Image (cartoon, helix red, strand yellow):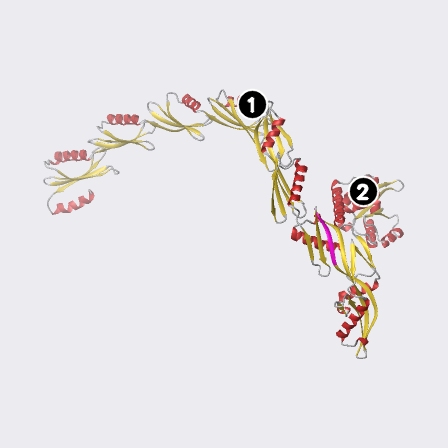
């Protein structure tokens, strides 16, 4: 398609300027520079070599809308001078006014070169300047819309009338009124409505000019409209709008109307109109009919009603519009259920290439939902019950149809992955040579091969050789595989040593990620390699680790081994309780402490409590080392009592002693004792660990001074 003026006028201002720039380059203009500044009032500055005058400077202005006026020509001349250019080219798509043409020919001939749209079109075609696809699409869309609009308005003809129309008539307005009603009430789209016939009903009436005298002197003049005996407007001048219509009608002798057919009626004759007007004026003005003079009359037509015959999609409708009130009514019947089913069947055949085997219909408001299935598809079609328009169509290829098609394409293949997403399905088919990825369009059943992947065994062998080197695992074999997102493969390798899950790129075989889990047997092997001389008591399999308990003759050990066998962590090591007991006994023997072990407990370290007749105490032994970290040995109360009594007998020759009290302050490391003798009372503070007397006092048991001193000593040795 070449350039036309109609096509050029469809282009935007920016598109025309881009085309002009391309044309300037084709015409030999050098350095055609776009001018953006508005105060220059031009679009391009360019240079061109003239065979006579040499290099010349040009300015170019482009106007895409409206005629160019003489003032605009003057302004362009000022821009030429401002730019110090030799000439200017004024391109006006719509052309120039008469005054502008005179000015260009008389004052600026040779200085300003005018191009109208037709000249620009010729140059564009002569130079084969291309038309953009976007512009062509927009132009075609505009033409289709215009053609559809003409079709929608029907094949109306111009019908000439022998008298003027008092009120104008517009078929477009009538059609718009009806379409608005159909759109709001029946949800019918405007593009489905086409006018097939328009009958306009007119009634004939009269414009009569009159004058009258009142009270013998006053003269009244006006026009009247008589449409029937009961419809008489005696004084038109009282209504400004009506007066203008009457004035226009009086200037015309005939009129024309655009319709398929016109039907006229005459509710009143000329003679009857004269009588009706005189009666009305006499009553209105309160004067006798003899004072009323009728000077002229003009027949006119008044549009009363428009009757429309419409095609609505594949249906038909009738409409009626009251042209006086603009009230409209539409008579349309929904399409039969059988017709709607027929449309659905045809659509299935057209879009899916198959006939429906089952059909159900559900109607809601102005829409019928027709659902069903064909041999390979399930479908749903929404139809407008009045126009038969397909509002929406949805179809989906059945899963069994996909698998059937795959079986035909790859008889030796096996579907190893299937996924549906919106209106497409992805399936991976494993063949002896590899895996083919197919994408099915669920709407129409078409399929394409989107990728060819490596065979899982090929990827497994590659992964096996790599991973067996990095993890002490042997004899791995492929036991399972599955695809994710069509092209990502997950394979499972297993042996007696454990299993490895590998995620790989199905196209390249590259390993994306892997997860290793050694077997319990392999875990035992790894642990015993490091802990020779130990035996495994218990092995528990947790989510990420193996939790293991070991023992030897002296100790217990708890360790954690990661599932991949790489990270071995010692969680706890402790001596056996019988070993701790032996360590404690040996310590007591070496210290010469005859005592029995009463209790052994484990906290951070071992605590051993022992009890003897003379000594009691507690040992703190290292949890795993067996080292004596701390020893607390205390004399018993019995030993303290016997030792101190012996001391008092030897020192003070007491023969009879009674113990009144012994108070042990273990945290302070001493005990307080009080003895009653024959003549004296004895107090002492004794070291719990070695039995040494830290302090002692005595006093007579009788006498005033003894009583005073006793109070003091009781406070000291409380």
**Main secondary structure found in the magenta portion:** strand
User: Label 1, label 2: how many angstroms apart (C-alpha)?
Assistant: 63 Å
- Graded by Cα atoms within 10 Å as few (under 14), some (14 to 19) or many (20 or more), the crowding at tag 1 reads some
The answer to whether any part of residue 84 appears in the image is no
Are dots 1 and 2 in contact, CB under 8 Å? no
Q: Quadrant of the C terminus?
A: top left
Q: Position of residue 584 (x, y in %)?
A: 27, 27
Front in this rendered view, residue 336 or 239: 336
The answer to whether any part of residue 236 appears in the image is yes
Residue 311 on the magenta span: yes
- Upstream in sequence: badge 1 or badge 2: 2
Count of numbered labels shown in the rendering: 2
Q: Position of residue 693 (x, y in %)?
A: 19, 36
Label 2 element class? loop
Horizontal side of 544 relative to 105 (left or right) equals: left
Kindly identify which numbered label has been placed on residue 3.
2
Kindly identify which numbered label has been placed on residue 629.
none
Front in this rendered view, residue 33 or 183: 183
Residue 556 vertical placement versus 229 (above, below): above
- Graded by Cα atoms within 10 Å as few (under 14), some (14 to 19) or many (20 or more), the crowding at tag 2 reads some
Residue 21 vertical placement versus 515 (above, below): below
Q: Give the residues drawn in magenta, as a range.
A: 305-313
Q: Quadrant of the N terminus?
A: top right
Q: Position of residue 659 (x, y in %)?
A: 14, 38
Horizontal side of 294 relative to 555 (left or right) equals: right
Front in this rendered view, residue 706 or 55: 55
Residue 108 on the magenta span: no
Residue named by callout 1: 457
Q: Position of residue 559 (x, y in %)?
A: 40, 27
Label 1 element class? helix
Front in this rendered view, residue 206 or 483: 206
Which residue is drawn at the image coordinates 35% and 26% (left, top)?
A: 556
């Amino acid at each position: 398609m070449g350039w036309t003026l109609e096509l050029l006028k469809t282009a935007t201002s920016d598109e025309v300027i881009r085309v002009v720039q391309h044309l300037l380059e084709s015409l030999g203009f050098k350095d055609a520079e776009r001018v953006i500044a508005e105060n220059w009032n031009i679009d391009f500055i360019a240079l061109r070599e003239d065979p006579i005058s040499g290099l010349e400077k040009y300015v170019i202005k482009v106007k895409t809308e409206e005629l160019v006026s003489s003032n605009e020509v003057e302004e362009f001349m000022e821009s030429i001078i401002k730019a110090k250019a030799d000439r200017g080219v004024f391109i006006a798509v719509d052309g120039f006014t008469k005054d502008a043409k005179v000015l260009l020919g008389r004052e600026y001939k040779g200085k300003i070169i005018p191009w109208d749209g037709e000249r620009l079109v010729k140059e564009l075609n002569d130079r084969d300047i291309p038309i953009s696809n976007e512009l062509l699409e927009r132009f075609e869309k505009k033409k289709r819309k215009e053609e559809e609009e003409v079709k929608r308005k029907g094949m109306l003809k111009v019908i000439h009338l022998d008298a003027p129309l008092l009120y104008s008539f517009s078929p477009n307005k009538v059609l718009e009124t009806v379409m608005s009603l159909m759109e709001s009430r029946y949800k019918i789209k405007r593009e489905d409505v086409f006018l097939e016939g328009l009958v306009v009903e007119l009634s004939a009436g009269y414009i009569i000019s009159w004058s009258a005298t009142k009270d013998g002197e006053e003269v009244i003049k006006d026009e009247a409209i008589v449409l029937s005996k009961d419809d008489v407007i005696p004084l038109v001048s009282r209504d400004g709008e009506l007066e203008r219509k009457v004035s226009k009608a009086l200037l015309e002798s005939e009129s024309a109307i655009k319709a398929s057919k016109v039907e006229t009626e005459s509710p009143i004759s000329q003679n009857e109109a004269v009588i009706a007007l005189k009666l009305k004026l006499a009553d209105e003005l309160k004067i006798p009919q003899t004072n009323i003079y009728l000077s002229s009359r003009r027949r006119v037509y008044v549009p009363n009603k428009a009757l429309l015959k419409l095609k609505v999609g594949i249906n038909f409708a009738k409409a009626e519009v009251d042209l006086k009130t603009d009230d409209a009514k539409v008579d349309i019947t929904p399409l039969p259920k059988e017709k709607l089913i027929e449309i659905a069947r045809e659509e299935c055949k057209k879009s899916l290439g198959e006939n429906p085997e089952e059909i159900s219909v559900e109607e809601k408001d102005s829409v019928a939902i027709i659902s069903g299935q064909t041999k390979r598809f399930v479908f749903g079609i929404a139809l407008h019950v009045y126009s038969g328009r397909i509002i929406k169509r949805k179809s989906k290829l059945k899963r069994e149809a996909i698998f059937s098609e795959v079986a035909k394409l790859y008889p030796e293949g096996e579907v190893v992955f299937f996924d549906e997403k919106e209106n497409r399905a992805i399936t991976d088919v494993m063949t002896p040579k590899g895996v083919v990825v197919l994408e099915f369009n669920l709407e129409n059943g078409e399929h394409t091969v989107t990728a060819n992947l490596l065979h899982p065994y090929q990827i497994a062998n590659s992964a096996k050789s790599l991973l067996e080197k990095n993890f002490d695992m042997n004899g791995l074999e492929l036991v399972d595989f599955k695809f994710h997102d069509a092209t990502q493969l997950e394979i499972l390798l297993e042996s007696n040593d454990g299993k490895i899950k590998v995620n790989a790129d199905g196209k390249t075989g590259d390993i994306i990620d892997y997860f290793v889990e050694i077997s319990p047997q392999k875990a035992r092997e790894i642990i015993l390699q490091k802990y020779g001389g130990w035996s495994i008591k218990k092995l528990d399999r947790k989510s990420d680790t193996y939790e293991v308990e070991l023992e030897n003759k002296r100790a217990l050990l708890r360790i954690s081994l990661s599932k991949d066998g790489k990270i071995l962590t010692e969680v706890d090591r402790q001596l056996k309780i019988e070993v701790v007991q032996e360590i404690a006994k040996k310590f007591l023997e070496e210290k010469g402490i005859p005592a029995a072990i009463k209790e052994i407990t484990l906290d951070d370290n071992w605590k051993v409590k022992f009890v003897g007749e003379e000594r009691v105490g507690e040992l703190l032994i290292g949890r795993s080392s067996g080292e004596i970290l701390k020893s607390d040995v205390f004399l018993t109360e019995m030993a303290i009592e016997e030792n101190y009594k012996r001391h008092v007998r030897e020192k003070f020759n007491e023969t009879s002693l009674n113990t009144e009290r012994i108070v042990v302050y273990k945290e302070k490391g001493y005990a307080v004792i009080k003895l009653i003798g024959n003549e004296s009372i004895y107090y002492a503070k004794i070291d719990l660990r070695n039995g040494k007397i830290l302090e002692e006092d005595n006093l007579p048991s009788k006498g005033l001074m003894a009583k005073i001193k006793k109070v003091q000593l009781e406070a000291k040795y409380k």
